[in-house]
Image (cartoon, grey):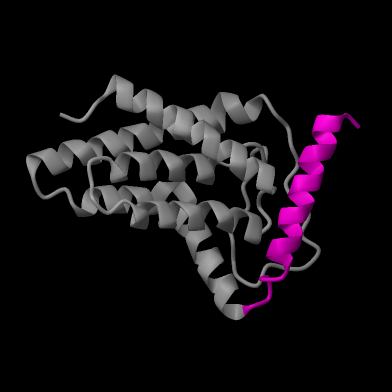
Amino acid sequence: MKTGEAAVEAFDEVVEQLFARLRGNPVADRVFYTASELGNFSILWHALAWAGATSKRGRRRAVRVSIALAVESALVNGPIKSAFNRSRPLAELDHPHRLRQPLTSSFPSGHASAAVVAATLLSESRHRRWPFWAAASMVAASRVHVRIHHASDVVVGALVGAVIARLFKKIWPLR
C-alpha cells in the first residue's frame, strides 16, 4: 500500500471511530438518517431554492440552483464516479432506519458535492449564510454516519462541489 493510500485509510478509520460513538443513539440516528434521505436527489436543496421563489428574481435564482444541481449530479454520478470504483463501507449491523442503497461507486460523495453547490449558491448575497452551511454539513456528515460513504469520499465530494459552484458562479453570475 502506498503512503497516500495509507493516509487516506487512516483518516477514514479515525472519522469512522468518531461516528461509531454516535451510532445507536436514537436521536443521532434519526437526525443523520433524515438528513441523508433529504439529500437524496437534492430534494432539500431544490425545496430551499424554490421556497423563496415568490418574485421574478427569486425564480431566476431557484432555476439557477436547480440547473447547477442537475449539472453537478450529471458530472458526479456520471464521468467522475465512473472513473473510480471504490467500494462502499461495510456495515456489520443492519441500519436502524430504512435507507436507499446507491449502486454507484462510493467515491466521491454526490450528497456532499450537491450540498456544497447548493449552500454556495443559496447563501450567495444573503446575510444569514450559516443555516445553509449547517444543513450542508449535516447532509454531508450523514453519509459517514449511515455508512454509505467513507469520510474521504465526503471530503473529496465537498471539494468537487466547491469547484462546480465556483465555475457556476463565473458562468452564471447573479445580477
Q: Left or right: 89 with respect to 3?
A: left
The C terminus lies in quadrant: top left
Residue 110 drawn above or below residue 37? above
Nearer to me, 60 or 158:
158
Query: Who's the residue at 66% across and 52% down the image?
Result: 148
Nearer to me, 120 or 127:
127
Number of numbered markers: 0
Magenta stretch encompasses residue 2: yes
Query: Who's the residue at 79% across and 52% down the image?
Result: 13
The N terminus lies in quadrant: top right
Q: Left or right: 27 with respect to 8?
A: left
Can you see residue 100?
no
Spot the residue most to the front. 127
Give the percent coordinates (x, y) of residue 173: 24, 26
Give the percent coordinates (x, y) of residue 39: 47, 52
Q: Quadrant of residue 169?
A: top left
Nearer to me, 175 or 36:
175
Query: Who's the residue at 80% across and 39% down the image?
Result: 7
Residue 71 drawn above or below residue 31? above
Magenta-tinted stretch: 1-25
Q: Left or right: 57 with respect to 87?
A: left
Magenta stretch encompasses residue 43: no
Give the percent coordinates (x, y) of residue 101: 63, 53
Nearer to me, 148 or 115:
115
- Dominant SS type (magenta): helix
